[in-house]
Structures are given as structure tokens and as C-alpha cells.
Image (cartoon, rainbow, N blue to C red):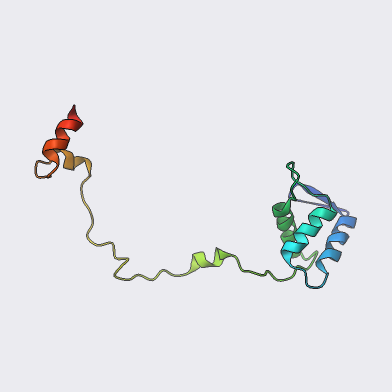
């Protein structure tokens, strides 16, 4: 493999080897890896900050392609929580459906506010 493009950046074989060395350090987590990779490869945003999110995406893609091994994530993301089944209770019962519209109540003489609000509304 000579070059690989990920997240808008071309990685040379030498850079991939540097990244592999960083990921193989003892007691280093993914956040620390992305910080160090950005610093070592001079990967910065125009505002001068580290390009961490792009780096993390690139690292994850390299991991999934089997090019390097990342340590397990410290925290799981919340993506799995979207697939939990919903539990319905009496509190979540929607009750009786509402028919009609709020506009109709403006012209309803049985509405207590009809007399005063209709005059102001129609002027």
C-alpha cells in the first residue's frame, strides 16, 4: 500500500506506520491517540485547533479495515439506546382524541371568552 486517502487527507505508508506505533503504546485511549496523531502529523484546522474529529473518523476506518488496532472505547455511544423497545404505561396513554381546531372556538358562542375576544380579534 503506497497511499491512502481518508477524511480528505492523504496518508503515506510512513504516516500509517507512525500511527500504528502511537496506537501500540501502553495505556493510551482513543482520545489520547487522536490528539497525538494530530500533533505528530501536523493535522490542524484553519483556526489552529487539532482536527480531532476527522482524525478519529480516519482512525476508526483504519481499524475497521484491519490496518491498525485501536484500544476498546472507554464509553459506549448512545446509538444502541435508539433501538430499545418502548414501554407503554397509563401515563403514556394519549387518551381521547381531540377533534376540531382551535380556530373554530373563536366563533363558538359557548366559549366563555367569545364575547370579549371575538370583538378584539375581528377589529
Q: Residue at x 12, y 41 (%)?
A: 108
Give the x, y percent position of residue 109: 9, 41
Residue at the outermost top position: 123
> Eyeballing the image, is 53 above or below 111?
below
Residue 2: tell me if it is visible.
yes
Q: Residue at x 21, y 51 (%)?
A: 99
Res 34 → quadrant: bottom right
Give the x, y percent position of residue 111: 12, 44
Give the x, y percent position of residue 25: 83, 69
Residue at the outermost right position: 14
Residue 62: tell me if it is visible.
no
Going by the image, does 111 lie left or right of 87?
left
Camera-nearest residue between 53 and 13: 53
Q: Residue at x 75, y 67 (%)?
A: 70
Residue at the outermost bottom position: 26
Q: Quadrant of the N terminus?
A: bottom right
Q: How many marks?
A: 0
Q: Quadrant of the C terminus?
A: top left
Going by the image, does 22 lie left or right of 112?
right
Q: Residue at x 74, y 41 (%)?
A: 46
Amino acid at each position: 500500500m503506497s497511499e491512502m486517502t481518508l477524511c480528505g487527507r492523504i496518508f503515506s505508508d510512513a504516516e500509517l506506520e507512525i500511527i500504528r506505533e502511537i496506537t501500540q503504546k501502553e495505556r493510551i485511549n482513543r482520545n489520547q491517540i487522536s490528539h497525538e496523531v494530530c500533533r505528530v502529523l501536523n493535522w490542524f484546522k484553519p483556526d489552529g485547533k487539532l482536527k480531532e474529529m476527522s482524525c478519529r473518523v480516519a482512525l476508526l476506518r483504519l481499524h475497521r479495515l484491519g490496518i491498525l488496532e485501536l484500544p476498546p472505547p472507554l464509553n459506549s455511544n448512545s446509538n444502541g439506546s435508539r433501538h430499545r423497545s418502548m414501554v407503554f404505561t397509563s401515563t403514556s396513554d394519549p387518551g381521547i382524541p381531540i377533534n376540531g381546531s382551535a380556530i373554530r372556538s373563536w366563533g363558538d358562542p359557548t366559549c366563555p371568552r367569545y364575547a370579549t375576544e371575538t370583538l378584539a380579534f375581528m377589529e
